[in-house]
Image: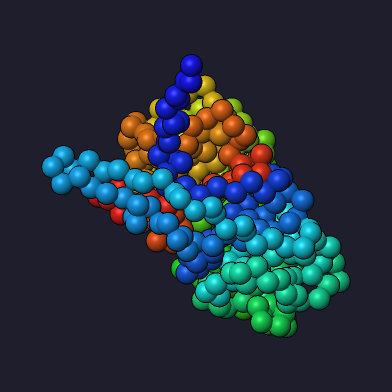
């Protein structure tokens, strides 16, 4: 007797996401400025490039039933195109990648000394030859103003076209992280025990602030008052730029790998706990002041590994140690499961500039682009 089995049901993630297995841990994900390509940095230094253009966009496969208003999405019918990959390891995976110009990316070469550039289609070209010392930090100034390159205690602004040096400044400490302020014309540089603030125009030092801990990232708040960094030692670094003082929020259950700011919700969010941690801006906890906490999502038994705030809505995405990905409205307990758990830890999340796409990277080597139908967030 022949047994007829029902076809397996597809999840929402299966219907609106495109996924590729890249073979090794995803360290970083970056959309380019115009949102046409996603650059993926893998743990071995290999780069992969995923196109945003989709021949079977979810909106093309969505149908709204006239009598009930029920939305259905037809499954994909065609195989996904293969991603473009670099010829072996080309990037220093520990220093990450940043966006430059409208379509490109910039990164430190695998040798640790040269600055390279990648196009949206994956062509890699050398920008600056090896300097007098290895590169210790890299960032891009907004509006094509140049690249910020740190070599130990020296900070340089170099032209992204040919790598020529435009400005230099020697700091009193080594530089391991660089954070240009989006609108305030300032740059923050972190090195062991110190944060130095400089002007974008001229690299003139403004202030030196003593700090504790070793942050793995450094972010400016939208109003330019706060510098916030997640630390490996299960803490969150806070720097009040107005007063020139620093503090730490300690005793997170896990390292704080990601920090984000939501303009729409007026809040800061962070990973490293059993739910999304957050506070209202500008009322962050500092010294004896407890700040205004923001409860987002539901507490669980699995650590939030990374978070990403939506660029235009009061939403955020959270990736967990068991592979679960959820979407939450900041300040609300309700959450939507986007991808089920049971897989490798989520290592990276990134929204496209228009907020239509969410890129997801995992420790098992899977990279995905989720494209949300227009009717989803009405």
Q: Is residue 375 above or below residue 189?
A: above
Residue 376 vs 325, above or below: the answer is: below
Q: Position of residue 68 (x, y in %)?
A: 16, 39
Q: Nearer the viewer, residue 70 or 295?
A: 70
- Please identify the quarter of the rendering in which residue 136 is found: bottom right
Residue name at image x 40 percent, y 61 percent: 354
Q: Image point 20% across, 45% down: which residue?
A: 65
Q: Find residue 96 and report its horizontal and vertical position in percent.
A: 67, 57
Q: Is residue 151 left or right of residue 204?
A: right
Colour scheme in use: rainbow
Residue 152 visible, this angle: no
95, above or below 343, in the image: below
> In this view of the protein, can residue 336 be seen by the observer?
yes
**Residue drawn 49% across and 61% down?**
52
Q: Is residue 373 left or right of residue 151?
A: left
Location of residue 170 in the rendering, given as x and y in whole percent from the top left corner: 75, 70
Q: Position of residue 339 (x, y in %)?
A: 47, 36
């Amino acid at each position: 007797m022949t047994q007829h089995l029902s076809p397996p049901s597809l999840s929402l993630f299966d219907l609106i996401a495109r996924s590729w297995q890249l073979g090794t841990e995803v360290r970083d994900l970056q959309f380019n400025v115009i949102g046409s390509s996603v650059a993926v940095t893998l743990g071995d230094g290999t780069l992969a490039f995923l196109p945003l253009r989709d021949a079977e966009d979810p909106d093309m496969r969505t149908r709204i039933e006239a009598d009930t208003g029920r939305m259905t999405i037809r499954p994909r019918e065609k195989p996904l195109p293969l991603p473009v990959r670099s010829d072996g390891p080309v990037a220093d995976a520990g220093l990450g990648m940043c966006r430059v110009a409208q379509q490109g990316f910039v990164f430190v070469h695998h040798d640790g000394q040269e600055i390279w550039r990648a196009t949206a289609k994956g062509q890699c070209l050398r920008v600056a030859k090896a300097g007098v010392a290895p590169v210790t930090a890299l960032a891009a100034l907004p509006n094509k103003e140049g690249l910020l390159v740190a070599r130990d205690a020296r900070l340089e602004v170099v032209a992204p076209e040919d790598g020529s040096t435009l400005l230099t400044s020697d700091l009193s400490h080594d530089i391991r992280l660089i954070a240009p302020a989006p609108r305030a014309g300032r740059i923050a540089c972190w090195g062991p025990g110190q944060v130095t603030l400089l002007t974008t125009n001229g690299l003139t030092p403004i202030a030196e602030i003593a700090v504790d801990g070793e942050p793995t990232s450094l972010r400016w708040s939208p109003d330019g008052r706060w510098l916030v960094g997640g630390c490996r030692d299960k803490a969150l670094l806070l720097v009040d730029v107005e007063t020139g003082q620093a503090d730490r929020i300690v005793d997170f259950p896990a390292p704080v790998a990601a920090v984000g700011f939501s303009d729409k919700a007026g809040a800061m969010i962070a990973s490293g706990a059993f739910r999304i941690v957050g506070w209202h801006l500008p009322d962050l906890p500092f010294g004896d002041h407890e700040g205004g906490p923001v409860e987002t999502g539901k507490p669980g038994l699995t650590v939030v590994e990374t978070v990403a705030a939506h660029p235009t809505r009061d939403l955020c995405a959270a990736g967990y140690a068991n592979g679960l990905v959820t979407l939450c409205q900041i300040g609300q307990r309700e959450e939507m499961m986007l991808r089920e758990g049971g897989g490798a830890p989520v290592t990276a999340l990134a929204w496209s500039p228009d907020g239509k796409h969410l890129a997801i990277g995992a420790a098992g080597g899977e990279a995905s682009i989720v494209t949300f139908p227009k009717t989803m967030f009405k």
